[in-house]
Image (spheres, coloured by chain):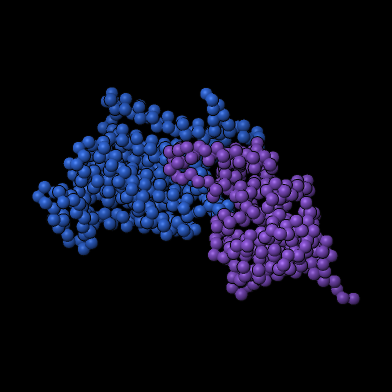
Amino acid sequence: MKNLHMKKYTRTNLLTYLGVIAAFVVMNMLSASGSLSRSLTGQLVPICCYMSMAVSLNLTVGILGELSLGHAGFMSVGAFSGIVAAMSLQSAIPSAPLRLVIAMAVGAAAAALAGLVVGTPVLRLRGDYLAIVTLAFGEIIKELVNCLLVGYDSKGLHVLFNLSGNKSVADLGLEPGGLAIIKGAQGATGTATIATFTAGFVLVLVTLFVVLNLKHSRAGRAIMALRDNAIAAESVGLNITKYKMMAFVTSAALAGAAGALYGLNFSSLQATKFNFNTSILVLVFVVLGGLGNIWGSLIAAAALTVLPELLRAFSDYRMLVYAVVLILVMLTTNNPTLKSFFGRFKPGKSHGKEAA
Amino acid sequence: MFGKLVPVPSGAMIPDRDIGKKPILECVNLGITFGGLKAVEDFNLTIGRTEIAGLIGPNGAGKTTVFNLLTKVYQPTHGTILLGGKDTHGMNTMQVNRAGIARTFQNIRLFQKLSVEDNVKVGMDANMKYNMWSGIFRLPGYWHEEKAAHDRALELLSLFNMADLADVPAGSLPYGAQRRLEIVRALATNPSLLLLDEPAAGMNPSETAELMENIRKIRDTFQIAVLLIEHDMNLVMNICEGICVLNFGRVIAKGSPEDIQSNPAVIEAYLGKKKEA
């Protein structure tokens, strides 16, 4: 214990890591003892993906302070490029975990590239342009994947854009042993589901590691500075565009990795899965968990993914209850009386009040 | 250190101790027009290496516009700005800061949610070298430079008796401390010219007295030039060596505090013309 006066954020970060590890251990124990319901077991990997999505979006929305409405678009780019990578490496790399890691790296790289393309023009502007452009980006990606045909045979990858709408998998010209991976509007079918809960757990840890360490380094400081006051940030010599790009592209890359894992969890996946609603869902995780609050995003993502499943018994009223719960949470967490009540339990908070 | 104003070859006046060194700032016929409005016109000003200079004038005279021109918040439509003899034409705000001009703002612009220490460290960012990956993977460069930045930040803060506030969010500081922090943050960028926009606004007499001490201390410790906009004439007349008076975007007088106090044009600008009997 040489570092007794640990900074407050270091303690919060440690608790976040510990919480994730504890949750993983508990879930593994529950699933080994067979006390997890079937639907919940199926939700484990998607929950990890959404946690990672929420934390990465928090980097853009909470830490950078720019509204992005197309996070699902980056997830989509990561998912389909990850599926293509995993499926075409099936024979070359027999080890499923290694293929999964490569697929997630490819997904991250592809999404980062997409982030770079979207961010380069938009992040030079001031104002709400990023929200508008990312909204369009999500829709464009959905349409592009919808007319994408990808196959793989011994000659390598065959890619075809079915823009006219009258081409089919047969036009790819695959060899007899070839494998069609993405089939236009049908999406990716016949995918080998190599995603595992452990991989999801590692993804969440890596996402946390990247976002938290970035936040508490010179880059994170600069990113939060330009969020707080762009004019002052420029006046002290910060390269605003560079730091905005850094946050946005990192956020996109992490969403891509999450997308690849998500894609490899289902044998069939359509581009319409990553629509505007999914982007908004992830944004809701971030807002509900608190802007810039990383562990809040984790909890919100997990709770709001499980909640609709648990409310299945109410079937018709499910979305209604979901909405009511959302509104109640927002009302109570914004209530000054409740805030001061909870504030009493926060370490170091009362001390600050005396000083003020 | 209160210099006597002497002329340089161009005819401008700078303190005698700065003679022989290139002036830190030379504005030549600087001007900007917004549509048809000439906000600043034919602005000429020369500041010595370690001079404390004042820019005064009635409200709306164009003082802050001059600061915005110097820091390239606005691009000048006329004239030249030489910083240490180097033309700043085509530079943006970030580049001008890196070239040596740091400023504070009339309406305080701190990074409210960052701690006091982090506000200062943001000022050092342009001089830090470790990249994003060193930051994420906590490579030796990160530890080395963050340690150095921490030490330097505390050193700068303690110069202004703020070291004990290092962990407080900047937005929750009292007003006077926020103004001081803005100055510390500007100093953290290692400027050679510090622009202060109404540093004494909203301060009581004892705070103003402390501020005057601090401005002198900044000049003596860092050996830099200070240009300040201020309405508090007591402060201006006490610490400024050269004063430039602006009215309706034009320079109406320049000189030492004594010259300015007795200048009829200045008196007229502030108090209006005496009625002819």
Is residue A173 positioned above or below A353 on the image? below
Question: Furthest-front residue in view?
Answer: B20
Residue at position x 46%, y 31% in the image: A14
* Nearer-the-camera pick, B194 or A8: B194
In front here: B32 or B256? B256
Visual hue assigned to chain A: blue
Query: What residue is shown at x 33% (from left), y 43% (from top)?
Result: A258
* Residue at the right extreme, as displayed: B277
User: Across the whole image, how many numbered discs are drawn on residues?
Assistant: 0
B43 relative to B141 in the view: left or right: right
Residue B270 quadrant: bottom right
> Does residue A345 lie above or below A123 as drawn?
above
Q: Does residue A81 appear left or right of residue A250 in this picture?
A: left
In percent of width and height, residue A54 lies at: 40, 43
Image quarter of the C terminus of chain A: top right
Who's purple, chain-wise? B
The answer to whether residue B191 is left or right of residue A90 is right
Q: Is residue A25 visible?
A: yes
B199 in relation to A294, above or below: below
Q: Quadrant of residue B102?
A: bottom right
Residue at 36% of width from left, 41% of height from top?
Answer: A50
Q: Position of residue A112 (x, y in %)?
A: 36, 50
Query: Residue B39: percent from the left, percent from the top?
Result: 65, 69
Q: Residue sitting at 58 percent across and 58 percent down?
A: B96
Residue A320 visible within the image: no
- State the image coordinates of residue B140 (x, y, percent, origin top left): 47, 37
